Amino acid sequence: MEIEVTESPDQAVNAASVSVVVPPHSTRSSRRSRVDAFYHWGSFVVSLAVVIILVAILLVLISTAWPAITAYGPGFLAGTVWNPTINVYGAAPFIVGTLMTTGLALLIAVPISIGIAILLTEYAPGSIAGVIGVVIDVAAGVPTIVFGAWALLELLPWMSNTAEPAIAAVFGWFPPLDPNNSPTGITGYGIFTAGLVLSAMIFPTIVSVTRGSFAATPLEMREASLGIGATRWETATRVVMRGARTGMLGAIVLACGRALGETMAVVYVIGLSPRIPQSLFDQGHTLSTILLTQLFGGNASSGTMTAAALYELGLILLALSLLAGLAGRYLTRRLSGALVLGGGR
Amino acid sequence: MQVDGSAPANGRGATVDLRNVNAWYGGAPALRDVTLTVAPRAVTALIGPSGCGKTTLLRSINRLNDTIPSYRLTGSLTVLGQEVYGKDLAVEDLRRRVGMLFQRPVPLPMSIYDDVAYGPRLHRLAGSRAGLDAVVEESLRMAALWDEVKDRLHHPGRSLSGGQQQRLCLARALAVKPRVILMDEPCAALDPGATAKIEELIRQLCAEITVIIVTHNLAQARRIADFTAVMLPSANGGGELAEFGLTPTIFETPTEPRTADYVAGRFG
Amino acid sequence: MRSGNLARRKLVERLAVTLCVLALLIALAPLVHVLYTAINIGGSRLNWTFFSQPAAGLPYIGTQGGVLNGLVGTVLLLFIGGLISVPLGVVTGMYLSDFGGGRLGSTIRAFSDTLLGVPSVIWGLFGFLLFANPISQVGLHLNRSALAGGLTLGLLMTPIVARVTEISLHQVPLGFKEASLALGATRWATMRRIGLRVALPGILTGVLLALTNAIGQTVALLLANGYTYLMPRWPPWGPQGNVTDLGSMIYLYLYQPTTLLHAPAEAAVVVLLGLVLIMSLLSRALTAIGRRNYAG
């Protein structure tokens, strides 16, 4: 029986009508392998772009920050004073500010997000869960300047007039919430408000990734738990959450990474004060807000030590964000790739 | 034996009793007018080709079909004297007294100890840590797993072999002292050695516990089942109970011609 | 026998579910309020003028006129960004899909994914130093301009496009690819005629995703492109080359020490949200179309 092979890439793939002829000499296959070799190496070279970009970012930042790195050494990280006019630079106020706002945001957003994820995967009927899921996904794509604007125009006055005095009245015995610890009293500006805005912004991330890791739990495991007489809540907390521990942690770490680099949402309400905040009601600065305010319309012209110190702050921020991103991706490596998309803003 | 499956009364009362049970998934019929009385402290096998309602019937007994929103059931289904689909039933209590083993072994994402202790902890069946330890050990012994795992109780259940995992699931079910255990093709994913162990355990358990087992393996049914119920395709979709009786009778001298065809391997 | 603690357990469940519903409401409330605020404060400014006129007015620019400069600027910046990121990202995705199984592929994927975690402000620093800065030793010296901003966006968007392209290509049923290869077609031909064709909706979704992300990169654009209230000029580089995007406009309107710009700012927020919503819905529609393609 004779089989004919003809390469016909211009026709639709239709197995029923193919005839197959094997050519006696492999001119055809060498042309094929030339085309594919070009494809292979050509696309490889192009894909090196992402490598080059990351390396370039590091190089550019390090070289610009170099004067400050060499001048101040590791003490820069612990330095608590930032005063360009007398050439004293320390990163601590901004690191603390970043950590405080991100920490507060996570504290608020994580329990809320986990509760929502349980609701959507274990309780809500499919159609409702789908709609809410879509709403949350769209919310994740909202530009953060929108939240910043809202924070300035609506949240700030409310915090200043209503919420913060109320919280101080009830919880003032707790040092971080003691208004006397804040040199300016209660103004609405400060870590607390900034943390609140951040939490409103990061919950979609935590919900999506947590839902994904809950969904990865096999149905049989839920049925095994229900089959022994557990309620749906007990199944959700003792079995599903337990099995999804890594994924949940990854969700939190990923959200943390995004919150660290967030600028627009907090820049209006954090108070822009380059010192270590003494309480949650106190003003502060984050690594990203100082960078934005000084490098845009600020007085940090290139080549000065101020600029170098600022770029060193940028390096610190980059290091923190990349660390969180790496850890988060490692923890969620078993989840569907599309979930963990998106960058910090 | 009548074709409607009612066994003669034996003085202990029916453990699981179905009368005129019909069930649907949405508009698609699954069970057609099933009437069946399961004998207590015996092994009853549900056999038949795929799609004839064996698993549906099994999962109705512990209301695990509740997880499927489109599922409906009419008729009377009583387990241990209680109407299962009645309004007052506490499903969690029912499922404590009716255990289940699934096709694939499902170790919970925790240590072996915690897995077996899962049920007793939920239902507060043990008064103290020592009591819990005792329950865990007893259950693992009954599942013939104790000697193999007693030194690694805090290892995750996932680390066990397939056959061991299924025995772990059995231990978990036994830990809440059920009266009935439902098994949905429990050996389907196991090798012959592990299968033999499970079958041996089933024969030991049925002295105290009623076992209802769905199986595609006719030889298995002949080996371990006291009673056999044959589910065959019903005329308008779904499955019906074609015949029910003592296992030797079903396999050697069945009354229904379709049963004879099925057990002879002529279809299914 | 009814176990005694079942009643308590069911009570716990009811309480817990109530709390979860509360959590959902608490989380959605700010979103709803953001939308409400934007429409409430900015709604009055939304008329045809707003969309067709650039910003104008004294003493603060923006009190009159509209956001045309911001709209056009946004489109221009996204366009330049897309020109760069789509070829780079799609080809990278193709490489990773066809040849990316080994360690080399994993490394490139790792770099690409790492870039996803770079904050906007860092992209801005990088873009400024490499493209915009007029007085550094290395770099393009484009000044804060549309080209500098667009280039920055392009680099920023590439990892997103690459990742979604790879995922979409992976979802092409293996049977299609194998049938083509079994006929003797080259991998290139298979990719061109089958892979890309079937994965096209997914890839477009990825591009949309990247564009939606890019719209929100306000900080990067401020640092690399700067700000102006004028409409785009030619050339898009040099001291006259900057434009503005919607996000930067909003930021700077609200930064001014006046309440006169609150309404125009929130109106711009509405426009921005509208853009994002359209892009999200398009993206969902594309995914639905794509799902039909994948029914191998």
Image: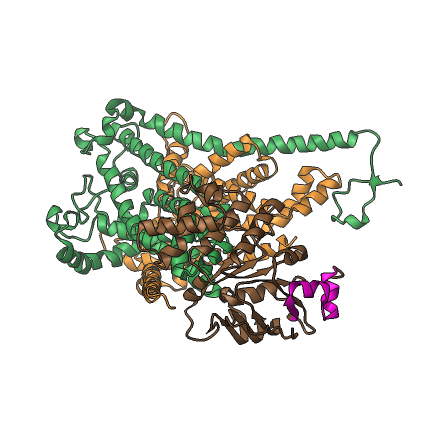
Based on the displayed image, in which of its 4 quarters is residue A322 positioned? Answer: top left
**Residue C273 placement, left or right of A12:** left
Q: Colour of chain B?
A: brown
Q: Which residue is situated farthest in the top direction here?
A: A70
Q: Colour of chain A?
A: green
Give the x, y percent position of residue A154: 26, 59
Give the x, y percent position of residue B80: 47, 70
**Residue A331 placement, left or right of C23:** right
Q: In the rendered structure, does residue A171 fall within the stretch colored magenta?
A: no
Which residue does the image show at 82% across and 29% down from the upper left?
Answer: A25
Give the x, y percent position of residue C186: 70, 37
Q: For the magenta stretch, what is the residue range? A: B241-264
Picture quarter with the N terminus of chain A: top right
**Residue B196 placement, left or right of C230:** right
Give the x, y percent position of residue C60: 27, 53
Q: In the rendered structure, does residue B251 fall within the stretch colored magenta?
A: yes
Which of the pair C8/C163 is nearer the observer?
C8
Which residue does the image show at 82% across and 35% down from the upper left?
Answer: A22
Q: Is residue B31 above or below residue A299?
A: below
> Which chain is depicted orange?
C
